[in-house]
Amino acid sequence: MASSGSVKGRTSSHGSAGSRGSRTPPTSAGKVPVHKSASASRPNADAARKPLKPSRPSDRLNPKTVDPFANSKKNQSAFASVYSSGGLPCRLVHGSVKHKIAWDSSPEHVQFDPVLVTLAEGLRETVHPYTFVSCAGFKELLEVQDSGDKAAPLLPKLAPSLRAALAHRDAGVFERSLDALQQLSDSVGPALNPHLKNLLMPVSKKMMDKKYKEKCTDILQQLEQNGGREVLPIIKSKVPTYSSIYG
């Protein structure tokens, strides 16, 4: 009986020793081992298995451009949306030498409101064909015989769009809007005078740039000629260095 008791004692002592041996070593005490799951490494593995799209030399020579006729309305401007949906009575015609626009009816019979107002909003466009359609359409409407009588009542709507185009950071937009300003002045004459103070604010800033100084000066002279002597104080208030055409 004594021997069996000693055997049990030895067995229990071995069991306790074994449990002590299975304890976590002191160096790793308090730390819980982190096991990475198979799902954590799966995205990398999937990416590695996904075939890479081969690059072509032509990709560098012909970068992707925005499709102006895409069906998606996302990120489209108001003018682009109207034109893409057929809301304007004109469309672009591609020529072998130069482009032109075709009207659904003669420009003389086009309703200036809202067509001319919409074209003025398009002067801020930077993507073809919107840039061409807006500028060419604006110009051709103002060339009709009685354009002044039709455009003058719309100046409160036209002036804000034209000013926004003149203040645009894009150089091409600014240059095209200068042409539009002259075309509008040639059409409505002195009727534009009350709006010149706001229109000339962005022009005066560009006068400091040698690149635009000559063209801006030509436009100011045309505005003075079309608007009469009362325009000079308006121009001088924005461009003090301007010299009158009347001496």
Image (cartoon, rainbow, N blue to C red):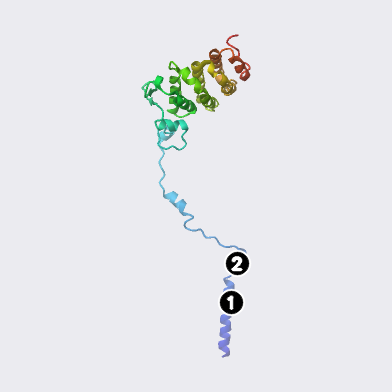
Q: Please name the residue shown 58% across and 72% down the image.
A: 21
* Residue 201 spot, x, y in % from top left: 59, 23
Label 2 residue SS: loop
Q: Please name the residue shown 56% across and 81% down the image.
A: 11
Badge 2 amino acid? Pro
Q: Which quarter of the rendered picture does the C terminus lie within?
A: top right
Badge 1 amino acid? Ser
Between 93 and 39, the one lying in front of the other is: 93
Q: Quadrant of the rendered structure where residue 81 is?
A: top left
* Residue 216 visible in the current orientation: yes
- Compared to 170, does 228 lie above or below? above
Counting other residues with Cα less than 10 Å from the Cα at mark 1, is it few (<14), some (14-19), or many (20 or more)?
Answer: few
Q: Quadrant of the rendered structure where residue 54 is?
A: top left
**Separation of residues labelled 2 and 1 (CA atoms):** 16 Å
Q: Which quarter of the rendered picture does the N terminus lie within?
A: bottom right
Exactly how many numbered labels are in the figure? 2
Q: Please name the residue shown 44% across and 49% down the image.
A: 47
Between 118 and 149, the one lying in front of the other is: 149
* Residue 128 spot, x, y in % from top left: 43, 28
- Compared to 15, does 204 lie above or below? above
Contact between labelled residues 1 and 2, with CB atoms less than 8 Å apart: no
N-terminal-most mark, 2 or 1:
1
Instruction: Name the residue carrying label 2.
Output: 25
* Residue, far top: 247
Q: Which mark is residue 16?
A: 1
In the shown orientation, is residue 98 left or right of residue 161? left
* Residue 95 spot, x, y in % from top left: 36, 22
* Residue 171 visible in the current orientation: no
Label 1 residue SS: helix
